[in-house]
Image (spheres, grey):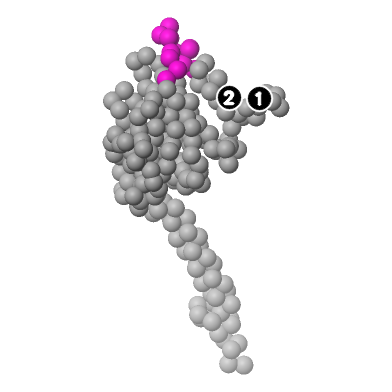
Amino acid sequence: MSDAPSLLNLSHPAHPVNRTLSVIKLLVLAVSVAAAIPTARNLYFSYKNDVPFSQVDHRLAQAALLEKNFDCKIAYRSLSAQGSAMVEVGSCSKTGDISIRVKSPDGQVNYEWIAFDQLPKPISKTASLFDLVISRALADEAVKGDKPFDVAQDATVLCQSKSGDNIIRVVQSGGQCTRETVSIFRGSVEKSEAVACNTACPIR
């Protein structure tokens, strides 16, 4: 009998309606906190890596692809247009993912990845997705203008290792080797130096 007044009093904390409202408030708070976590994460990565906030999701996806294909020693096919950046394309035989290495006229190098499941299907069963990418790249170069394009020397990753937030790799091109320090998150080469091909690997 003592509980009857409290059950009729909506302002009483023990009233079932109030308990239900309290649970709903907690759920709303939990959802709000959960929704804020990705934003806070992106702000952190943007600040730490000096990347625009709008590009964080893309860079995180690129970092995941780089980690996924870390064990692949990729051989790049090079494309270059006179007076423009050099573009080198390679694929990982294990995953089918495509790696694009772009070197700007000022020497800056950046890596971009395309996941295999994002690639268009081959026109025929015998067509290679990699060959389709190369053909499309050549076509894109051709329509840019009347400047001829040259096929540059191919590049091959000889060895690589992880060092904190970076990947150290040795790339051979035209009989010369370069040791690159690649930011896993930004996909950019932060440091590059010429090394002797016969002593560059393994990386210490």
Dot 2 lies on which element? Answer: helix
Dot 1 lies on which element? Answer: loop
Q: Specify the farthest residue to the top.
A: 146
**Percent coordinates x, y for residue 126 in the rendering:** 69, 25
Instruction: Please say whether residue 197 is one of the residues in the magenta stretch.
Output: no
Front in this rendered view, residue 181 or 197: 197
Seen in the picture, residue 201 relative to 14 is either above or below; the reply is above
Quadrant of res 151: top left
The quarter of the rendered structure image containing the N terminus is: bottom right
Residue at 36% in and 36% down:
197
Q: Is residue 138 visible?
A: yes
User: In the shown orientation, is residue 9 left or right of residue 197?
Assistant: right
Q: Specify the farthest residue to the front.
A: 198
Q: Which mark is residue 170?
A: none
Residue at 38% in and 43% down:
201
Q: Specify the farthest residue to the right.
A: 125
Look at label 1 and name its amino acid: Ala
The residue beneath circle 1 is: 127
**Percent coordinates x, y for residue 73 in the rendering:** 48, 39
**Percent coordinates x, y for residue 22 in the rendering:** 51, 72
Look at label 2 and name its amino acid: Asp
Residue at 39% in and 25% down:
174
Front in this rendered view, residue 170 or 147: 170
Which residues are the magenta region?
140-152
The residue beneath circle 2 is: 131
**Percent coordinates x, y for residue 180 in the rendering:** 34, 38
Seen in the picture, residue 83 relative to 129 is either above or below; the reply is above
Does the CB distance between marks 1 and 2 fall below 8 Å? yes
